[in-house]
Image (cartoon, rainbow, N blue to C red):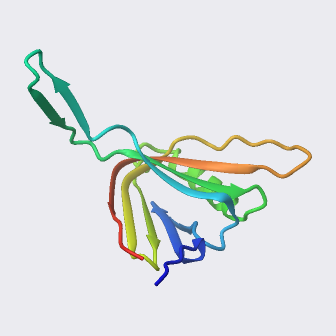
Amino acid sequence: MGSTYSFLDVTCTIGGPGFSISLGEGSGNAEEGITIQMVGDKNTMLTGADHTVMHSLHATNAGTVSVKLFQVSPKNALLQAAYNATRMSSSLWGKNTISIEQKNSKDTIVCNTCAFQKQPDISYANNGAILTWSFHCGQIIGMLGTY
């Protein structure tokens, strides 16, 4: 019995004050797709002079979500509009939620209190570019399923 992964089974939605944008399959995603990365280790281990060990569990669940889109993706314009709208007021900033799901394995990742990290770097060159939209997320909670 084999298992198959496909980005075709990935859904991703970012929602915030006045907007909801689908960023999964069919959005003009670059080959690198979507990356979820925690900001730091969950544990620190200290070893004493007498070889005792102390673990410290860190409370943070903060991290970064990056979505890589082709320069020609129409989702860039929607994200730019959302970025521009939310940066107009601190009452709108950091109120986004990102939900990612891989339907085949039933992976589910929910990211709360998300803010745009910055506007993506843009270049106009011989070949079209990949725009990376990165979001700082105050809380990332995930459940990985099985294939």
**Farthest top residue?**
49
Q: Specify the farthest residue to the bottom.
A: 1
Instruction: Tell me what residue is drawn at x 72 percent, y 65 percent.
Output: 74
Quick check: can you spot residue 18?
Answer: no
Residue at the spot 34% in from the left edge and 45% down from the top edge: 62
Classify 52 as above or below 72.
Answer: above
Q: Quadrant of residue 142?
A: bottom left
Residue 21 appears in view:
yes
Query: Which of 83 and 30 lies nearest the eye of the viewer?
Result: 30
Residue 49, percent from left and from top? 11, 15
- Position of residue 39 measured from the top left corner of the image (x, y, whole percent): 39, 39
Q: Quadrant of residue 56?
A: top left
Quadrant location of the C terminus? bottom left
* Coordinates of residue 113 in the picture (x, y in percent): 36, 51
Number of numbered discs overlaid on the protein picture:
0
Q: Is residue 71 above or below residue 46?
A: below
